[in-house]
Image (cartoon, coloured by chain):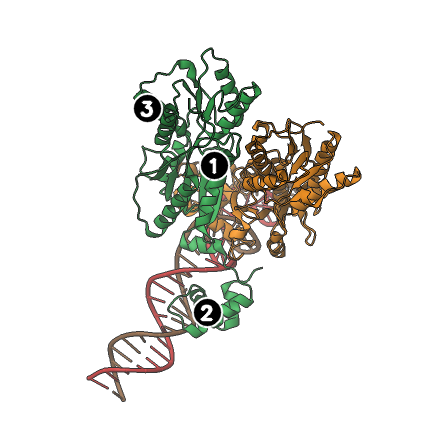
Chain colours: A green, B orange, C red, D brown
Amino acid sequence: MSVTIKDIAKLAGVSHTTVSRALNDSPLINPETKERIKAIAGSMNYTPNYSARSLVLDRSYNLGLFFTTLHTGTSAGFLYEAIKGVNDVIKDDYNLIVRGIDDYKSFHKVNRKNFDGIIVMSQSESDQSFIEYASDKEIPLVVLNRPVESVQVMNFVPDDQSGAYRLTEYLVQQGHRNIAIIEGKQGFKSTQARRDGYREALHKHGISVPEAYYVSGNYDLESGHTAMSKLLELPDRPTAVFCCNDDMALGAVKAVTERGLSVPEDISVAGFDDHLFSAFMSPALTTVRRPIEELSRAGAETLLKFIETKHSEKSVVLFHTELVIRDSVKSI
Amino acid sequence: MSVTIKDIAKLAGVSHTTVSRALNDSPLINPETKERIKAIAGSMNYTPNYSARSLVLDRSYNLGLFFTTLHTGTSAGFLYEAIKGVNDVIKDDYNLIVRGIDDYKSFHKVNRKNFDGIIVMSQSESDQSFIEYASDKEIPLVVLNRPVESVQVMNFVPDDQSGAYRLTEYLVQQGHRNIAIIEGKQGFKSTQARRDGYREALHKHGISVPEAYYVSGNYDLESGHTAMSKLLELPDRPTAVFCCNDDMALGAVKAVTERGLSVPEDISVAGFDDHLFSAFMSPALTTVRRPIEELSRAGAETLLKFIETKHSEKSVVLFHTELVIRDSVKSI
DNA sequence: CATAGAAATGCACACGTTAACAATGCTCTT
DNA sequence: AAGAGCATTGTTAACGTGTGCATTTCTATG
């Protein structure tokens, strides 16, 4: 049995209410008794029962960080940066609960009593039902990474389309005209945004793309490898390939070297995300940096502020993506 | 205001006790009323208040997954596999709380009321105080990844030393005699185990290692790069380098190619961990697979079983590591 | 038909905390 | 000196759930 405020009260010769107030720094309590009680609590090694507190205060001190899935499509680096960003912000005040939405059989346990707030790192529209569910239950909610229309939420997203646009334009500026794309996982919003940026840039420069230059992938290493293999077998091989994330770019480079060709001499490769390892690949990967950690931090901060003040701007905020030029693209 | 069992009771014309029993499938309740109550609960969209339940049952339904740190030394892939492994096991029954131990200012909130069980993914002895704290508070505890002596706990660790031994022996079998090592983060147990395996193998084959062949690193990409740079400047450059993890191996390869040399023609490189990307590097990395996901899954399963049965074997269980031969080591 | 016992349900309290309201003692003002 | 007002503490109820014990109703047995 652990110590409770009543135990402390008995020892201090006061009521348990006084103890509660003293430990919560209520101004109602005489500073001297306050100190005395705190000392006793310390010496008894008291720790509050959060279940009891939660019950009466109607707060769980739990924060949810939910990903679309923890299986295919979520890269390790993405998960890592997101968790780091959020954990940096919440300090000792909250528990961070990490989970894949597709791991839930039912959303039963997801409710206001169980979560003071929820951060959804949304990668696909398949999350829509979850987001609507949470929004419906009036759980404070921030959606990151994917713009969500139907529901009014706080929504932070990286500007993928613009990043893809600038990257593609850079390829064009380097003299490339035959530029292929290895696409991300079907159904992911980011897949679409990056494809759109790519098309927009090519269209603006009057470059048309043969159907065969669109190759599908699913964001993992293996899919980049097989996609690039297909491209290399084409009669009119592209001179540059835009891979929709860095993982696939790594797989793609692998496919190139396996054939005795080299990047960027024989074919240029660019990625997206700027993973930790991208600067250390050979050749170092030209890519687009996505500020996931900043995004997560901002999301967590906004959520906490909302929980405290019940006040927020429910709108989409774009986070700037940044072209990172390294060595995997040759000027021709 | 959300619905409570009292609301259901009123509607069903029974006492809230009956409702509680019905929803918990108590055999005391008439099957018919049980069904009727469940139906009403369903239609009212009832979800139990876990704070209240926790208070009376003295269980939090929270599981902690704690890492030594979420900053340097913990690679993204490691975090990813661990979270995936644990989440696969716990299903809808528990909340998984993820956190870096060094993020805690005080362990105040870590107690039996708040956590039904804890999994420590321990990388360094700096966790010792945390482990002792949790063990002291009699929180069901599993320690993964690092053997812990002083305290009796359930302890699952990969056999790093044997892995490093086999890898090093393989290098010797390929004809290498000048084998350097890029070490992991100081103070991490894995650093020591891998170094020991390396030394043991070389010693067994009567190979002595010059002092300059021990280069320090800290498990991140950059440190592998700088460490390899140092090795390449040596007058008697090694013919093979054992990097204590794959991240550093990637950095090391980078340093080699930057100098116009190549792996494995000019120098062989081996890693440790078998990260997702390691098979896709150029050249594909020879390394040692560490079954982190299995380890995590086993840890979670054991923990859950212990929570339910209060029965366990408190001993160290070794998980087999596996030599993965790819293309980054040349036979000379 | 009476009664023992089982089946089904309800009453009342407990878990540990917070908070509205009441009560006490003190100081200061007129 | 009496009463207003403040500072400090206590009394009591509430949050939603589970459970030991009492109670009621029904069934079966002699």
Q: Looking at numbered disc 1 in the image, what kind of residue is underneath it?
A: Phe
Q: Looking at numbered disc 3 in the image, what kind of residue is underneath it?
A: Glu
Q: Position of residue B134 (x, y in %)?
A: 60, 54
Camera sees residue A112 = no
Towards the viewer: B81 or A216: A216
Q: Are marks 3 and 1 on the same chain?
A: yes
Q: Are marks 3 and 1 in contact (CB under 8 Å)?
A: no
Provide the chain ID for the residue under circle 1: A
Say what secondary structure mark 1 lies in: helix
User: In terms of sequence position, does the residue under pointer 1 or pointer 2 come before the other?
Assistant: 2
Between disc 3 and disc 1, the foreground one is 3
**Residue bearing the label numbered 1:** A78
Q: Are marks 2 and 3 on the same chain?
A: yes
Quarter of the view holding residue B129: bottom right
Residue at the (46%, 25%) spot, across then down = A269
User: In terms of sequence position, does the residue under pointer 2 or pointer 3 come before the other?
Assistant: 2
- Mark 1: few/some/many CA within 10 Å (<14, 14-19, 20+): some
Q: Position of residue A6 (x, y in %)?
A: 50, 65
Q: Are marks 2 and 3 in contact (CB under 8 Å)?
A: no
Q: Are marks 1 and 2 on the same chain?
A: yes
User: In terms of sequence position, does the residue under pointer 3 or pointer 1 come before the other?
Assistant: 1
**Residue bearing the label numbered 3:** A200
> Which disc is residue A5 wearing?
none
In this picture, is A88 found above or below B292?
below
Towards the viewer: B52 or B11: B52
Provide the chain ID for the residue under circle 2: A
Provide the chain ID for the residue under circle 3: A
- For marks 2 and 3, give the CA distance: 71 Å
In this picture, is A212 found above or below B222?
above
- Mark 3: few/some/many CA within 10 Å (<14, 14-19, 20+): many
**Residue bearing the label numbered 2:** A15
Q: Position of residue A300 (x, y in %)?
A: 40, 46
